[in-house]
Amino acid sequence: MSTIKFQDLQKDDKPLLDSYFHSAYYENSHFNFTNLFMWREPYRIQWAEEDGILFMTCEWEGELMALQPFCDSAKYEEAITKFAAHFDHMGKPLVFMGIEKHFADALEAYSDAKFEIEEDRDNWDYVYLAEKLITLSGRKLHSKKNHLNAFRKLYPEAEYLPITADIITACKIELNNWYKMRVQDEANDPFIGWERKAILEVLNDFDYFGLKGGAIRLDNRIIAFTFGEPLNLDTAVIHVEKADPDIRGAYPAINQGFVEHAWSTMTYINREEDMGHEGLRKAKESYKPEKMVEKFNARMK
């Protein structure tokens, strides 16, 4: 069996990849073009299309890994077999990362090989009811409502704005301010620099990616901004959220404002994973997720 002919992910690939991501109900926040494009360089993301199957791979610290194939589930066995042959040709063990439960089940049922499958809790997505993020009603979200009310009381002149061309430059300035503060605290974290570069790329071509964005302006500067897009029929995914940490309530304000203004017709909001960071996990859990999107890793035995 011939190897799969992969190519580097590029911006012009968006229409084709979108057609695969939109062809089924995927819940994994990574399964959209914007997310993969933003992280294509550090993870060396590549793709190939063969016989109605979208194959994707990534690489980290020298380990080659496969994403689950994007295709009709009836083609899963064919796709797994092709991936196995490709990885064997490369002299690498077949490893899948970040797969959804239904594909993990397909690996369990695969007849030609056995897979060791494990949960990847650090990369589970946090999913919230949009209505609850807008109203912040109930005892469990009382502290969030207090922070939001404090922000509105302290800064009544603050205004929410959708991201349009006329404020993108101001958003970039806020991003650079955020980056300078984070670098001081976590100088050895390479992801901070990669994330800054990725966000700038998206902001520089915002309309092309088909995103919605929101920002808060206070005293003629942007103090918070965010952007996201539909992930599936009833869920929006939030790719980025940045705010001035020295302004009390800025994060709750942009979180609530964006969902209210951009995603009130959606049922769910996917706010991605915590990556095993204790502080991030605490913050995401504090908003009381409605559900988690489980992800798994698998290795052929």
Image (tube, grey):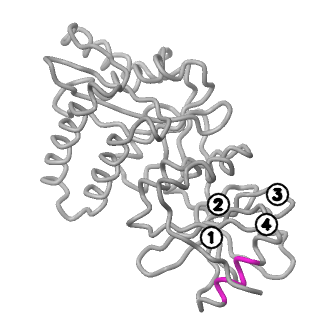
Q: Circle 3: is it few (<14), some (14-19), or many (20+) Cα within 10 Å?
A: some
Q: Indicate the secondary structure of the residue bearing disc 4.
A: loop
Query: Magenta span covers which residues?
Result: 82-88
The residue pinned by badge 2 equals 99
Where is 75 relative to 20, above or below? below
Counting residues from the N terminus, which is met first, the one under dot 3 or under dot 2?
Answer: 3
The residue pinned by badge 3 equals 73
Left or right side of 73 for 300: left
Marks 1/2 in contact by CB < 8 Å: the verdict is yes
Q: Quadrant of the N terminus?
A: bottom right
Q: Give the amino acid at mark 2.
A: Ile
Counting residues from the N terminus, which is met first, the one under dot 4 or under dot 3?
Answer: 4
Quadrant location of residue 71? bottom right
Q: Circle 1: is it few (<14), some (14-19), or many (20+) Cα within 10 Å?
A: many
For discs 2 and 4, the disc positioned in front in the rendered view: 4
Q: x%, y% of residue 86? A: 67, 83
The residue pinned by badge 4 equals 51
Q: Give the amino acid at mark 4.
A: Asp
Q: CA distance from mark 4 to mark 1?
A: 20 Å
Q: CA distance from mark 1 to mark 3?
A: 16 Å
Q: Give the amino acid at mark 3.
A: Ser
Q: Circle 2: is it few (<14), some (14-19), or many (20+) Cα within 10 Å?
A: many
Magenta run includes residue 66: no
Left or right side of 142 for 270: right
Q: Circle 4: is it few (<14), some (14-19), or many (20+) Cα within 10 Å?
A: few
Furthest-front residue in view? 12
The residue pinned by badge 1 equals 96
Left or right side of 36 for 190: left
Q: Indicate the secondary structure of the residue bearing disc 3.
A: helix
